[in-house]
Amino acid sequence: MDFRGAHIISVNQFERDDVERVFEVADTMEPYAHRERITKALDGAILGNMFFEPSTRTRVSFGCAFNLLGGHVRETTDVKSSSISKGESLYDTARVISGYSDVIVMRHPQVGSVAEFAKASRVPVINGGDGPNEHPSQALLDLYTIRKELVSNERPIDGMHIAMVGDLKHGRTVHSLSQLLLLYKDIQFTLISPNELKMPTDIVGKLREAGHTVVETDDMEAGLSDNDTVYLTRIQEERFTSKLEADIYRGRFRLNQAIYTRNCQPNTVIMHPLPRDSRKDANELDNDLNQHPNLAIFRQTDNGVLVRMALFALILDVADKVEQTGSKVGWYTESRFE
Ligand code: NCD
């Protein structure tokens, strides 16, 4: 695909080469993300960071990625404080904000909203999550992380075994990640969820059509064996009609040290898009795994900055200007990255 000026709405836009290109550029961002070097590649550029649903990581890491490339960030962080609450349409908002920005990242609770917004926008738009539908930048950073983690286990992405656990019905991260994996070969998916929260059948159908193996189960301990990666998710309570309904499923599938040791392969990588629900009644990923070397959740969040920098650099066509305008940081800094 031609990244220059492109909207990034769905993982289905990507070919395998495009994913490789994002990863290649992401690798070059490391000294900048790790605060060894600074760059002015996006000096003067403005990101419109439009978040109409709660977000910590996605919003801050997109903003941070843009800043690290030398650009400025303008933010709207909820519906109440934006003119959408006065009845403004996505069309009008897109026309307006695209006059103020060079690129826009948008998160919104409605399926298809970001695509609709992008149609009216005069600048490229990146989908930061449209309801339960998709979250393409998260899928890219997840796959980038999986690739890095598996390299140290001498395993490629093709042929890998992955278990996805939790609310697979509403979780946009697993919808995007599994569809991004359509580009790879012979993957074994073990989809562990309550019966009512299974992965949408159209996605499962696409995975099987692409030649992948898909096992669906609600038996977590059995499903955990024999995986390169276990990807846990939170019950997406905001997608249920009531908190009470979400409570039925909360806490049903949990991973902790004992369950991991009993069921997983010694190398199994533990992932989660975060936030993990750490309340006692949920706790899908226990703190007792915090020091476990295979826990990749904070490597995932660090990698998110690299991947988002790569997306901006490719869309705004400055990948080759990063180094040209780069220099060493001028302040005291110690490495805190793995
Ligand atoms: C996820 C999301 O918003 O879809 N968070 C994220 O972007 N890292 C997952 C979630 O909220 O459970």
Image: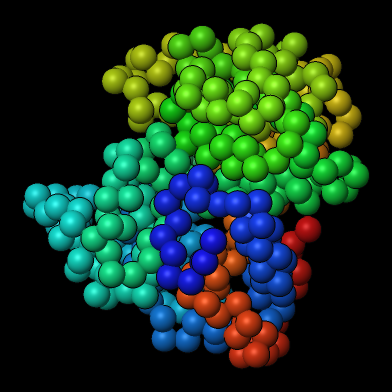
| Residue toward you, 225 or 33 | 225
177 up-or-down from 34: above or below: above
Give the side of residue 8 with respect to residue 286, left or right: left
Residue at the image point whose x is 66% and y is 20% from the top: 214
Residue at the image point whose x is 36% and y is 14% from the top: 245
Chosen colour scheme: rainbow
| Residue toward you, 330 or 51 | 51
Residue 336 occupies quadrant: bottom right
Q: Quadrant of the N terminus?
A: bottom right
Residue 93 visible from this viewpoint: yes
130 up-or-down from 217: above or below: below
Give the side of residue 117 with respect to residue 323, left or right: left
Q: Quadrant of the C terminus?
A: bottom right
Residue 142 at x, y percent in the picture = 64, 46
Residue 234 at x, y percent in the picture = 52, 29
Residue 269 visible from this viewpoint: no
| Residue toward you, 92 or 1 | 1
Residue 321 at x, y percent in the picture = 60, 85
Residue at the image point whose x is 78% and y is 39% from the top: 158
136 up-or-down from 229: above or below: below
77 up-or-down from 53: above or below: below
| Residue toward you, 101 or 56 | 101
Give the side of residue 132 with respect to residue 208, left or right: left
Residue 206 at x, y percent in the picture = 55, 28
